[in-house]
Image (cartoon, rainbow, N blue to C red):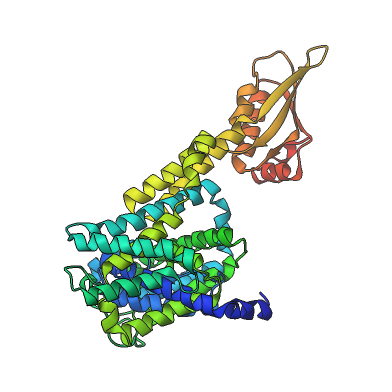
């Protein structure tokens, strides 16, 4: 990335990016507090983490306009560590997770994202939209009619105000209007202060107060590695979604290392590891936050609200935040995918639906994506396997039979060749022609070698012709370079 491009990502449309970042801040607060409780830590741990990671990733990340914070997927991984060993172990795990992510970036492991298909991405987005909406349901249960009225007013402001003017993001107006109404007409409603105690001071530099022994690292390392993988997966998935929505390209390697550096800072300031948050990111994009300044503002404004405007934030009606998050969930969901379920091939639709189902049932985005990728890989292997064909041709005297292989031979398809061979025919010479075939792995080479051996045991002369360099290399690795004619 050139210096000019990096500076342009900071300076384009500053007013719009600042306002969009402020919307992202309000969208962060309720989710981060909820995720903090899910991880078993105080709200300030998640809120301070979101402040630090937003500031750091704005500087070091590779995807402008993406909001990062203390996300639910990482919180679920961290919960067992906190419940079993306490906050200090979580801080060490956060530092190590950041180090792992920097290492992954340096090793270019972000290229693994190429194995995530379009249907898995769609399932990921839809499942996240469902989780965002379902997270608002507890705030709408066992409440008075005043809450429903405020949510309705909030949704009306969010959706109708942009038809009149887009100078100021409508969610900000929603928060101000609903907070003003609750002040002017006191009513029995929940406010942000009811979600949990908010911090009133600044985060301070700290180190984990635990013995740095081998036993400690044995406990922490598995959690740190899992947090690093889950965080990277969600961040890179979010970056891919932003790339598509904005028709731009991001630096995925820089995002990996940037996230790692950010999480190291998070650990040093007493927070838990975080990653990209797609719901908040979609809200940021919706209101024009395309640059690094919007990400920076989301973090800086969060700290300002927590410290300088603590009392105001505490009195913001939860109904306002619910209205905003409902809008985010509706915007996040890919509504066209409902039509595509019928129009697309059944296997592709199945992958998308399984991804959604696993994420919704487990509340684990990484598990859903992993299942989707695995299922997609199985379906792809099955489709490629069906393309393998073997044709036969005999000489006039019947002494030589040629098997011509067409297609890609790998672990799932190599058995097609074996099934096509007649080991009891009368031909004394067998030719296996690989001119129109490719061997891709050691399993295919092993199948080819065993097939040739079985034929030779029956007194036949076997020749493998027109094999490419890869086939020769794989057969040589098995110790049978002389099989090729």
From the image, which quarter does the C terminus lie in? top right
From the top left corner, tell me how far across and down residue 297 is, in percent. Answer: 46, 79
* Residue 414 in view of the camera: no
Does residue 15 appear anywhere in the picture? yes
- Please state if 186 lies on the left or on the right of 341 as rendered: left
- Estimate the x, y position of residue 119 in percent, counting from the top left: 51, 46
Q: In this picture, is 165 found above or below 460?
A: below
Q: Position of residue 209 (x, y in %)?
A: 29, 82
Frontmost residue, 9 versus 411: 9
Q: Quadrant of residue 459?
A: top right
Q: Splitting the image into 4 quarters, where does residue 252 fall?
A: bottom right
Residue positioned most to the right: 396
What residue is drawn where x is 34% and y is 88%?
204
Give the residue drawn at x 71%, y 46%: 473
Counting labels gives: 0
Relative side of 286 to 142, left or right: right
Residue 258, position as x, y percentages in the image: 52, 74
Q: Is residue 232 above or below residue 394?
A: below
Query: 352 or 330, which lies in front?
Result: 330
In the displayed structure, would residue 83 be above or below residue 300?
A: above
Quarter of the image for the N terminus: give it.
bottom right
Front-most of 444 and 42? 42
Residue drawn 37% across the image and 76% down it: 49
Closer-to-camera residue (271/33): 33
Question: Which residue: 40% across, 57% down?
Answer: 329
Residue 478, quarter of the rendered image: top right
């Amino acid at each position: 990335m050139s210096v000019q491009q990096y500076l342009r990502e900071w300076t384009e449309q500053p007013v719009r990016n600042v306002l969009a970042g402020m919307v992202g801040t309000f969208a962060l607060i309720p989710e981060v507090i909820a995720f903090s409780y899910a991880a078993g830590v105080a709200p300030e741990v998640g809120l301070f983490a979101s402040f630090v990671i937003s500031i750091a990733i704005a500087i070091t990340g590779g995807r402008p306009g993406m909001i990062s914070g203390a996300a639910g997927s990482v919180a679920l991984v961290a919960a067992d560590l906190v419940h079993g060993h306490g906050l200090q172990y979580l801080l060490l795990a956060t530092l190590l997770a950041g180090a792992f992510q920097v290492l992954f970036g340096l090793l270019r492991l972000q290229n693994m994202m190429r194995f995530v298909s379009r249907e898995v991405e769609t399932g990921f987005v839809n499942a996240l939209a469902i989780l965002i909406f379902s997270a608002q349901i507890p705030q709408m249960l066992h409440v008075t009619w005043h809450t429903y009225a405020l949510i309705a007013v909030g949704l009306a402001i969010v959706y109708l105000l942009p038809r009149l003017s887009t100078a100021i993001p409508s969610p900000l107006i929603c928060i101000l209007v609903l907070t003003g109404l609750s002040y002017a007409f006191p009513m029995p409603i929940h406010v942000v202060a009811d979600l949990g105690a908010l911090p009133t001071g600044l985060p301070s530099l700290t180190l984990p107060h635990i013995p740095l022994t081998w036993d400690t690292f044995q406990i922490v390392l598995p959690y740190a590695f899992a947090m690093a993988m889950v965080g990277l997966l969600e961040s890179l998935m979010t970056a891919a979604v932003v790339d598509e929505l904005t028709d731009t390209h991001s630096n995925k390697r820089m995002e990996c290392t940037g996230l790692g550096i950010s999480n190291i800072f998070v650990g040093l300031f007493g927070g838990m590891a975080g990653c990209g948050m797609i719901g908040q990111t979609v809200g940021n994009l919706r209101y024009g936050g395309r640059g690094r300044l919007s990400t920076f503002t989301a973090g800086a404004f969060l700290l300002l609200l927590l410290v300088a405007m603590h009392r105001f934030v505490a009195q913001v009606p939860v109904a306002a935040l619910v209205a905003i998050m409902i809008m985010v969930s509706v915007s996040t969901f890919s509504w066209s995918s409902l039509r595509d379920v019928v129009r697309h091939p059944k296997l592709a639709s199945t992958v998308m639906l399984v991804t959604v189902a696993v994420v919704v049932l487990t509340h684990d985005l990484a598990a859903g994506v992993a299942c989707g990728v695995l299922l997609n890989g199985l379906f792809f292997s099955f489709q490629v396997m069906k393309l393998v064909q073997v044709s036969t041709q005999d000489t006039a005297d019947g002494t030589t039979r040629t098997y011509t292989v067409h297609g890609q031979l790998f672990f799932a398809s190599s058995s097609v060749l074996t099934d096509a061979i007649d080991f009891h025919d009368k031909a004394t010479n067998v030719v296996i022609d690989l001119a129109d075939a490719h061997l891709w792995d050691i399993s295919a080479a092993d199948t080819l070698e065993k097939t040739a051996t079985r034929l030779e045991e029956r007194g036949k002369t076997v020749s493998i012709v027109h094999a490419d360099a890869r086939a020769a290399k794989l057969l040589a690795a098995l110790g049978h370079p002389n099989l090729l004619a």
